[in-house]
Image (spheres, rainbow, N blue to C red):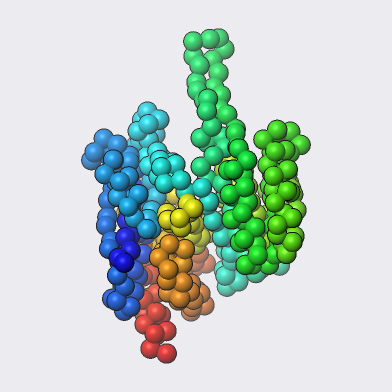
Amino acid sequence: MTKKILILPGDGIGQEVTSSAQEVLDYLMVENALDFSVTHMDVGGTAYEKHGSPLPADVLAEAKASDAILFGAVGAPQWDDLDWDHRPEQALLGLRKELELFANLRPAFLFNELASASPIKNHIIENLDILIVRELTGGIYFGEPRGLVTSESPHYAFNTMIYNEDEIRRIAKVAFEAAQKRNGKLCSVEKANVLEVSKFWRSIVSDMAKDYPDVELSHQLADNTAMQLVLNPNQYDVIVASNLFGDILSDIAATLSGSIGMLPSASLNSTSQGMYEPCHGSAPDIAGQNIANPIAMIASLAMALKYSLNEAKLAERIDNAIKTFIANGHRTKDISTDNNSLNTSEVAPLIIEILQNDSAN
């Protein structure tokens, strides 16, 4: 059965990095005679300019019919003053909600050759390999009621943090099972000392631990985890957190690697349909300059092959090609220590060359 892939480049450097991932995908499709159907459509600010909506109805329909979505990035200053419903970010939030992409997997890892690019001392950061499992469709980002009240003085705004038991159990299940496949350690992060929602979260995760006796469960307050990620990141294996805390912690973890341009992510629903995107944003300040690092997008393609497209071996080949790429000394501007760096458009051909050599051997 044909697998459907939807590519949504979005805005800024999203256009450039998805082009690189497309090159790698095209090569693998030919090399392996893959029965994939690939469609390109607009989202974000680009879609708003063309169609009056950051997430047009036909794009959402195509996304729902796809097995995997490769998502670039959205947003730029020229759209900052739009109404909330028209902002580019609504494309991302809308897809997560409508496709019920509740589980966000964000690996944070370090190639030891790039340890000098990290702001953390080498002896602390070497061999970094963490997986953050972030709940993606609940919590304070989606909770109701929410609003801005200007009819009273003083004006005020409010949001609602809410999780039900089913939402907590399904994200914790993903995290426990991920820990089983890694090093058997799971840290559940919340603020149970001050938030009722977090107390409830902790009680549910603790109850589930009896079903995973091979996983060592710990609990930690979110502010302490933020500090510990900088002081001693290698104490962690898998971290599970709510939408808000997972958002913050995964960005901290990403910066440890030296460049957020290296890290992919996957957002999955209960049917293994997924949206795959780099952890970086649209970076409008460097868009169109051919200097963005496309490795995170290429690694996101690998995650798509693994989790949604039933091509785990090809995913492993891409991951190994990226390792070889770094080991061979290739660097884009964000991870280069001198002025000798590759342009965006030069990365995919080198990755493909490594894949070709791998296939020949």
Decide: is 156 above or below 212: above
Q: Residue at x 35, y 70 (%)?
A: 24
Q: Residue at x 54, y 39 (%)?
A: 138
Residue 218: image location, x then y, percent: 75, 53
Q: How many marks?
A: 0
Q: Residue at x 54, y 56 (%)?
A: 105
Query: Do we see residue 153 in this rendering?
Result: yes
Query: Do we see residue 23 in this rendering?
Result: no
Residue 256: image location, x then y, percent: 61, 58
Residue 92: image location, x then y, percent: 41, 44
Decide: is 141 above or below 38: above
In the depicted view, which residue is nearer to us: 99 or 104? 99
In the depicted view, which residue is nearer to us: 21 or 310? 310
Find the residue positioned furthest to the left: 50
Tell me the quadrant of the picture where the N terminus can be found. Answer: bottom left
Tell me the quadrant of the picture where the C terminus can be found. Answer: bottom left
Q: To which quarter of the image does residue 311 belong?
A: bottom left
Q: Residue at x 37, y 35 (%)?
A: 87
Left-right relation of 340 to 195? left
Residue 294: image location, x then y, percent: 41, 62
Find the residue positioned furthest to the bottom: 361
Left-right relation of 101 to 76? right
